[in-house]
Amino acid sequence: MGLPVWTIAVGVVVLFLLVWTAWTLTRLRRLEARVDRARTALESQLRRRAALAAEVAREGGVPLEPARAAGLARAAAGASLPWTPDRELAENVLGRELRGLVRELPRMAPALAEDLTGTAQRVALARRFYNDAVRDTAELRGRRLTRLLRLHARRPLPRYFDIDDSFGELAGTAGSGRH
């Protein structure tokens, strides 16, 4: 006499659940690492953009009005805040200040204008990669069985980083006549 069929069926279901749980936990750890790497890349690009904005405010080769240069310098300093919800606001303020400089790009030192435009495009890409990683993590953690088993329930869910990063697109159109 062998084991009853229902015992084998329960065993298969439990084994499947264990394998699925192990796979999901591994996937969640990989997604968490992906979010961390994307966040590091995004922070790096945001710091680079703030440093370039501060440089433009100091000596961009463009005669900026003192009030405009001071506003750009304040926005660059504000964008150097640690990663908090206020950081998005500070980055949006810096983005508005930089969009105000799009017409000035042809008058800037070519290397600085190119660096500023390239950094703005890299910020947009880094933000998209970060938000994609956050979305994938939220989607996996939001699945019914993942929630039911409370996988990664103690870890905070990463937040999207939503800023208006349209400078790269505007600068690309503004600088196209220069080349």
Image (spheres, rainbow, N blue to C red):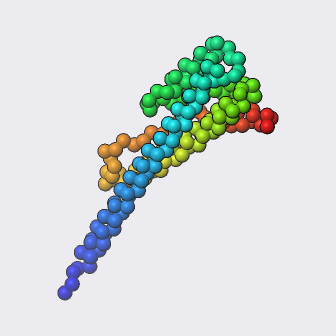
In the displayed orientation, state which residue is furthest to the top.
Answer: 66
Asked whether residue 166 is in view, the answer is no
Above or below for 37 versus 79: below
* Left or right: where 96 falls relative to 133: right
Question: Could you say where residue 13 lies in the image, as x and y percent from the top left?
Answer: 31, 69
**Residue drawn where x is 27% and y is 72% of the image:** 11
**Residue drawn where x is 31% and y is 51% of the image:** 150
**Residue drawn where x is 59% and y is 17% of the image:** 71
Asked whether residue 16 is in view, the answer is yes
Above or below for 83 versus 8: above
**The C terminus, quarter of image:** top right
Question: Could you say where residue 48 lies in the image, as x and y percent from the top left?
Answer: 56, 33
157 or 72: which is nearer to us?
72
Question: Could you say where residue 78 lies in the image, as x and y percent from the top left?
Answer: 51, 23
Location of residue 22 (image quadrant): bottom left
60 or 75: which is nearer to us?
60
**Residue drawn where x is 58% and y is 38% of the image:** 123
Above or below for 59 versus 84: above
